[in-house]
Amino acid sequence: MKILNVVGARPNFVKIASIMSAYRNAPGIRPLLVHTGQHYDEALSDLFFKQLDIPKPDINLGVGSSSQAVQTADIMKAFEPVMLQHKPDAVLVVGDVNSTIACGQVAVKLGAKLIHVEAGLRSFDRTMPEEINRVLTDAISDFLFCTEQSGVDHLLHEGIQRGRIFLVGNVMIDTMLRHRAKAETSRILEMQGLKPREYAVLTLHRPANVDDPAIFGRILDALEHIQKDMRIIFPMHPRTRANLAHSDLGKRIETMPGLRIMEPVGYLDFLKLMTHARVVLTDSGGVQEETTILQVPCLTLRDNTERPATVDSGANQVVGRDPVKILTAYRRVMDQQRLTIRTPPFWDGRAAERIVRILCERFNV
């Protein structure tokens, strides 16, 4: 059985790592790895592949960055000849980036089975490009592997047949647990002069947060207070950096000595930073999940989350962009000596094994 496995951006790399590893115990499956090149930071992309022990891609489409429509179209045009050449039995896509829906559409139209890992997540915010990608990919998939019960519930509500839905756990957590000990060897804390639980980590990249200077400015209102109390480490996404260069917000950040901007860091360094942080502030879905297992308080700078299991666990608070709400939640975290955080079902490091076992059973491999 031949499966084309598609990755396109850094969150995908973390998810595909455990799946590619699990295939090693399934000799009846021939996996090929397709890198669409959606992510524009080539050096960091290579670093992730090396650190996560992901095999070198069999095919690299080299699409690069562009607008939503142009990038999706370019991926589809580049992926179709790959499908025609290799004639796979199935295509596996992960997450919710443009590569996911672009390659999913091509696969289904050419008669291959479509496998979606991380299916069923819903923010119910159709202004998010990721939400559109999730909904459309799920609608055309043959196998839908869910990280949490909410995903199963959403898919059933949308009319997906129960026999196509599988609650297997979280492949991103598989990868994190496998590399946690290795991440502890990182010297990022020493290099940055940081002590455990005496700093915060910040990530911001979503268009809704960083494209509008007024909204970004309100987030900075809260950060301005927090950075006086605790150093904030901010590995800055290229999109965020580009927006700051075209506004006055960059100058404002320069007046905040406790807000330390860094270049994006590799997976192991970032995992070490999160592991020992006092609190993490983010608009990333994956970071919400990782902090849940790391038992680190997370403040999500959005009005919604497609990962309610992280909130139910007690680790994550969805605080929006109102500086008053952000600061209230931050102070609540600082007043707590230790959180009681519950691990969501099946987030045990074996999700990829379950996925590959189910595929072997269903395809009679």
Image (cartoon, grey):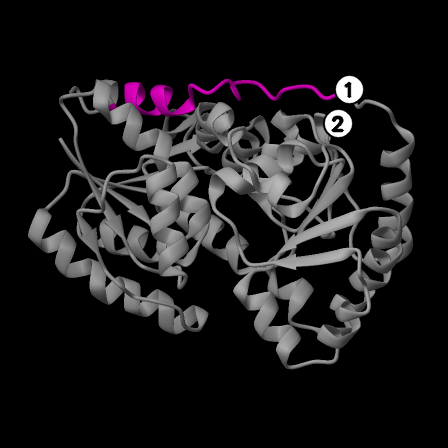
Query: In terms of image quadrants, where is residue 144?
Result: top left
Magenta extent: 340-359
Marks 2,1: beta carbons within 8 A: yes
Q: Indicate the quadrant containing the C terminus: top left, top right, bottom left or bottom right.
A: top left
Q: Can you identify the residue that label 2 sits on?
A: 314
Residue 355 is covered by the magenta coloring? yes
Q: Which residue is drawn at 46% across and 46% down?
A: 11
Which label number is shown at residue 122?
none
The crowd level at tag 2 (other Cα within 10 Å; few <14, some 14-19, many 20+) is some
Q: Which of 257 and 102 is in front in this view?
A: 257
Expressed as whole percent of the image width and height from the top left, the position of residue 211 reads 64, 71
Helix, strand or loop at mark 1? loop
Q: In this view, does 340 lie above or below 231?
A: above
Query: Residue at the spot x=49%, y=38% of the render?
Result: 268
Q: From where the camera sits, is residue 121 visible?
A: no
Residue 236 visible to the viewer: yes
Q: In this view, does 83 lie above or below 26?
A: below
Identity of the amino acid at label 2?
Gly
Picture residue at 29% right of the left edge, 54% below the top: 103
Distance Cα–Cα, label 2 vs label 1: 6 Å
Label 1: which residue?
340
**Residue 30 is a magenta residue:** no
Q: What element carries label 2?
A: loop
Q: Position of residue 108 (x, y in %)?
A: 25, 49
Give the residue furthest to the left: 85
On the image, the x and y values in percent for residue 104 come to: 31, 51
* Amino acid type assigned to the residue bearing label 1 in the image: Thr
> Residue at left 70%, top 48%?
304
Camera-nearest residue between 195 and 28: 195
